[in-house]
Image (cartoon, coloured by chain):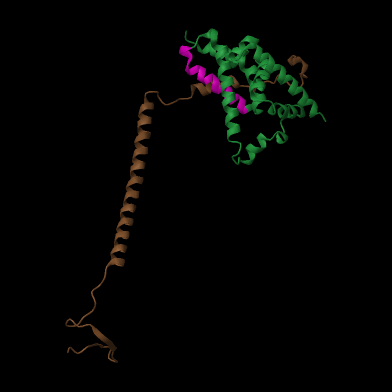
Chain colours: A green, B brown
């Protein structure tokens, strides 16, 4: 039943890239995304005695999705606070110099999507999970997932078109 | 509608920062307080909070008592009445301060 260090490391190597890409389209900051990813794997490591290797990937995704949700909600909750200049600059898409123009347009478009649609779209694009597994992760029916995905794609396409120079 | 309909330029797959696994290993290996110390730390924190609350209460209580005592004294001073000045049971009708700074009391002659 217990998870070995090797199994955890193998899971990290397997999931690092898809999870990083998923998190990056939420927070647009590589260091923060890695920090969240490490948070998730540290939690799994602490619970390794109770985790079965076969359920590790699903559990890792659940942890990452929840951490991203919490972090996103916390950011929205504290948005009214006067932040230090460095943080404000990082939060403002127009000042994020490390992003190219496509990333900036995508970021502005994704920020206008409802969080639930954004979640569906990003998981579909980056997780590599089966549709049924994504639906299970999000606790919704497959039909709901399909309709949210359809709406998200239509909306993102129209937002990207609107922002074309 | 499929995700392929969005230009892949927008959702290109990025490489995570190099050395992530090594950083995770270091993070996991970082020493942490022993789990058995947790109840002790929790109890210590509670005790500290209780001591702080107690000291705040003591200061507050002393200030309250002092304020009450001052209010009582004020009441006494404003409500207390001195008996009228009399000399041999007779109220003076006139006061006179002499050049030698001697205060003279003039009383009515008793009938």
Closer to us: B45 or B66: B66
Tell me, yes or no, whether the highlighted magenta stretch contains residue A37.
yes
Quadrant the N terminus of chain B occupies: top right
List x then y, in percent, for residue B50.
34, 38
List x then y, in percent, for residue A25.
67, 24
Q: Which residue lies furthest to the front in this view?
A: B111
Residue segment shown in magenta: A31-50
Residue visible at 64% across and 38% down in the picture: A86
Q: Can residue B49 be seen in this view?
A: yes
Q: How many labels were placed on the picture?
A: 0
Q: Can residue B12 be seen in this view?
A: no
Closer to us: A129 or A144: A144
Prevailing SS of the magenta stretch: helix
Residue visible at 62% across and 28% down in the picture: A31
Q: Hey, which quadrant is residue B68 in on the image?
A: bottom left
List x then y, in percent, for residue A110.
70, 26
Residue visible at 35% across and 29% down in the picture: B40
Q: Hey, which quadrant is residue A61 in on the image?
A: top right
Quadrant the C terminus of chain B occupies: bottom left
Relative to residue B47, is residue A156 drawn left or right?
right
Q: Which residue lies furthest to the bottom in this view?
A: B99
């Amino acid at each position: 039943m217990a998870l070995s260090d090797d199994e955890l490391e193998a899971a990290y190597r397997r999931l690092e890239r898809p999870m990083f890409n998923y998190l990056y389209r939420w927070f647009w900051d590589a260091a923060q995304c890695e920090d969240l990813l490490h948070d998730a794997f540290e939690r799994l490591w602490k619970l390794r005695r109770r985790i079965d290797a076969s359920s590790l990937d699903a559990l890792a995704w659940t942890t990452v999705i929840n951490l991203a949700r919490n972090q996103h909600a916390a950011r929205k909750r504290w948005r009214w606070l006067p932040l230090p200049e460095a943080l404000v600059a990082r939060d403002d898409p127009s000042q994020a110099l490390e992003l190219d123009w496509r990333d900036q347009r995508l970021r502005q478009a994704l920020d206008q999507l409802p969080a639930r649609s954004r979640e569906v779209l990003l998981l579909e694009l980056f997780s590599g999970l089966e549709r049924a597994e994504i639906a299970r992760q999000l606790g919704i029916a497959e039909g709901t997932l399909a309709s949210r995905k359809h709406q998200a794609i239509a909306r993102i396409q129209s937002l990207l078109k609107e922002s074309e120079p | 509608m499929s995700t392929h309909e969005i230009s892949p330029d927008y959702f290109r797959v990025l490489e995570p920062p190099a050395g992530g696994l090594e950083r995770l290993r270091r993070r996991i290996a970082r020493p942490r307080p022993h789990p058995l110390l947790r109840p002790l730390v929790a109890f210590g924190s509670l005790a500290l909070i209780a001591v702080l609350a107690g000291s705040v209460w003591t200061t507050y209580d002393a200030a309250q008592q002092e304020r009450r005592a001052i209010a009582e004294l004020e009441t006494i001073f404003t409500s207390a009445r001195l008996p009228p000045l009399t000399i041999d049971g007779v109220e003076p009708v006139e006061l006179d301060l002499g050049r030698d700074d001697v205060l003279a009391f003039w009383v009515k002659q008793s009938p």
